[in-house]
Amino acid sequence: MRAQFRIRIRLVLAFVLLGALLILTRLYFIQVVHGQDYAQKADAQFASGGSGLFDRGSIYFTRKDGTLISAATLKTGFLVAINPQTLADPEAAYAAIAVVASSSLMSRDAFLAAAAKKSQVYIEVAHRLSSEQGQALAAEDIPGVQVLQERWRYYPGGSLAAQTIGIVSYGSGGTLTGQTGLEATYDSTLSRSGSSLYKNFFAELFSNVGNLLVNARDAREGDIVTTIEPEVEMRLADDLAKVTTTYSSQSSGGIIMDPTTGAILALGTYPTFNGNDLQNINPDLLSNQLVEHVYEFGSIMKPITMTSALTAGVITPETTYNDTGCIVVDNAHICNWNHKPYGIIPMQTIIEQSLNVGASWVAEQLGQTQFREYFTKIFGQKTGIDLPNETDALIGNLYKPQQVYYDTASFGEGIAVTPMQMIRALGTVANGGVMETPHLVSAIRLDSGIVRQLDWGTGTRVFSANAARETTVMMDALFDNIFSGGKAKIPTMSVAAKTGTAQLPTPTGTYYMNRFFHSEVAFFPSFNPRFIILLYTNDPKNVEYASESLTPSLLDLVHFLINYYAVPPDRGLATTTISV
């Protein structure tokens, strides 16, 4: 009996302790995790009985040491509303409001028209006042004027990664939702129901205990953590702006990615916009060129052609051919960039000298069927990047019988792909032939405090590891021997690289003779890569080759990343085998 009594006491004590633990846990989330939200909601109870304060989850950058930096958050301030029925002197009221809120106040005529609507009792006339402005106006105590708390979406980085982060604005349903970028892709996670923070304190304390155990609501609402490194993003943005302004390009873009995982550290285009200034945004800039626009990338496609042929076994690095400088295929002339014949040369020279005739010859050895198979594995589907409106590549020419379409595709003309598809393809070469899914979000921080890591799956093998390594050797030699006349070589670091200069297509299907699309790629360390960089600039002026327009920025980013991440030297490891 005494033993049974002790067991019962212990069971009761265990239940009491468990209940206390659950209560303490819930108190922690209410007072610490959501403390600021509750405080703001309490403040809002002193405002007009309108809708609740705008609420939305945050988006974070991730520094190299794991520190989270706010990319999108909420900012709290005040709005000004009038009650036309009690507003005695509209002219005086407008003058008083204009003293503290001239930048956000509606025009005088619009204000007076609103004040004349005597059937209404609440009209908002100014938004996004600071605490100081709101307090100053409230102290005036103007009859018929209310100063109320409000919250809005705020991007601390301004234009930093703006097209990737996206914007929030009113949708078709009249509610604030994510319209572009990550704001749109993860809208269901970032959106808030708006009801949970209005509950009675003790109701909130006990009502969601089940969610802590079964994770029900947590699956919906939280913050998102991106792989974007803010320092790297800023350096990329500066380089893109410099290239675009220096050469008066239509636009420029770039992506920096870990080719072994697909995690994107930086990406962007220029010109861009500031998400905090929606009224002055050029709507054309809201679309993300990196996933929504396709381009003919030119010669940075040659490593894909080479690796395909090496994987298929139709060539080896020692294979030679007779380069005549120009050839005729299906009545079309294909020539090297300098029209120069190189005679009997190995495959290495095709990459080093960027020979169109050589790439065409490799495509013909591969054959139409195998060429199409490899290129559709790479470009035949979207990348799966977690950004909205990703478009398909234009590779219809690879289903035509004429050989010329395969020849031109081998050096990056006649087919058009997105920058995201291009870096994924070249990242496959860097990653020993395995294609990863590029992605921007690494984790979701649920409202319960739980962090859910996202699983982006395992890679898909496209090329053989040996073929990828053989192409890398060629690109590595190109960087050491050709880039900046051999002066770009880094004695302590191997870098694999390729440049591309493509003629821009005309609306009639021909090509401009004096307008170009420039692109460059580099990954390093060459045989155990941590980073791959893709840069492009569209229609630069007074410069013909990418080696002139983009190489300075590419080298700047390579050296920056080596120093910023303290990448250890790898020279002497170039003969090791890639592990996959």
Image (cartoon, grey):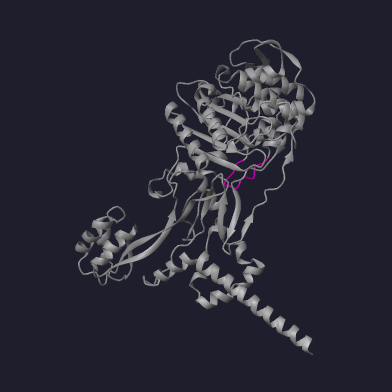
Which quadrant is home to the N terminus? bottom right
Q: Residue at x 45, y 50 (%)?
A: 155
Give the x, y percent position of residue 383: 64, 42
Viewer-side residue, 284 vs 457: 457
Tell which residue pokes out farthest to the front in this image: 2
Is 259 situated left or right of 147 in this image?
right
The residue segment tinted magenta is 381-391
Quadrant of the rendered structure where residue 352 is? top right
Which quadrant is home to the C terminus? top right
The vertical placement of 217 against 171, above or below, is below
The vertical placement of 184 against 536, above or below, is below
- Counting every numbered tag in the picture gives 0
Quadrant of the rendered structure where residue 15 is? bottom right
Is 332 situated left or right of 3 in this image?
left
Give the x, y percent position of residue 410: 67, 25
Viewer-side residue, 214 vs 544: 214
Residue 382 is a magenta residue: yes
Viewer-side residue, 356 vs 319: 319
Any part of residue 401 in sight: no
Give the x, y percent position of residue 343: 69, 9
Give the x, y percent position of residue 121: 32, 71
Residue 71 is a magenta residue: no
Any part of residue 404 in sight: yes
Q: Main secondary structure of the magenta part?
A: loop
Q: Residue at x 50, y 36 (%)?
A: 236
